[in-house]
Image (cartoon, rainbow, N blue to C red):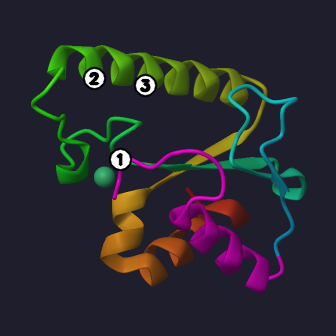
Amino acid sequence: MSRIRGKDTKPEMLVRKFLHGRGFRYKLYDTSLPGKPDLVLPKYKAVINVHGCFWHGHEGCRYSKLPETRKEWWRQKIEKTKANDRKNMETLEAAGWKVLTVWECDLKADAEERLERLRKSILGGH
Ligand SMILES: [Zn+2]
């Protein structure tokens, strides 16, 4: 189900396992940074957020479809999350951090390919 949220979600575990296996070291949920990013890689001055498509309102994604019941309530809730995400990203970028977002659906479609791209982004490319 794509509506589970919180710490240690399956997509996050995939990302952690991949990076750890390739020698990257990271901190989890660093409370000193805005939005408490899922992973922080101080050495590369990079943060990674692994976003659930539903909770973070992935635009144009089939997993972000709102339930028919209490639709307006959900819409507002998710808009608020998105606004927070944007604000945190801007604050981090302004402080010189590289902010990388991995969507849950990308990991469902082709995790290997997505994680490889993530690795390259951490190392320098955009
Ligand atoms: Zn998605």
Dot 3 falls on a residue whose secondary structure is helix
Query: Is residue 56 depicted above or below 94 in this figure?
Result: below
Mark 1, ligand 1, within 8 Å: the answer is: yes
Disc 2 vs disc 1: Cβ atoms closer than 8 Å?
A: no
Return the residue found at the far front: 69
Which kind of residue does numbered mark 1 sit on? Cys
Distance between the Cα atoms at labels 2 and 3? 12 Å
For label 1, the residue is: 53
Residue drawn at x 77%, y 33% is 96
Residue drawn at x 53%, y 20% is 84
Distance between the Cα atoms at labels 3 and 1? 11 Å
Could you say where residue 103 lies in the image, as x and y percent from the top left?
A: 42, 54
Residue drawn at x 76%, y 84% is 22
> Which badge, 2 or 1, is on the more N-terminal residue?
1
> Which badge, 3 or 1, is on the more N-terminal residue?
1
Q: Which residues are magenta?
A: 1-23
How many neighbours does mark 2 have within 10 angstroms: few (below 14), some (14-19), or many (20 or more)? some
Residue 82: mark in rendering? 3
Q: Tell me if 103 is positioned left or right of 28 in this view.
A: left
Which kind of residue does numbered mark 2 sit on? Trp
Q: Tell me if 97 is positioned left or right of 101 in this view.
A: right
For label 2, the residue is: 74
Could you say where residue 86 lies in the image, as x and y percent from the top left?
A: 51, 24
Could you say where residue 102 lies in the image, as x and y percent from the top left?
A: 49, 55
Which kind of residue does numbered mark 3 sit on? Lys
Disc 3 vs disc 1: Cβ atoms closer than 8 Å?
A: no
Q: Decide whether residue 20 is among the magenta residues.
A: yes
Dot 2 falls on a residue whose secondary structure is helix
Could you say where residue 8 lies in the image, as x and y percent from the top left?
A: 65, 58
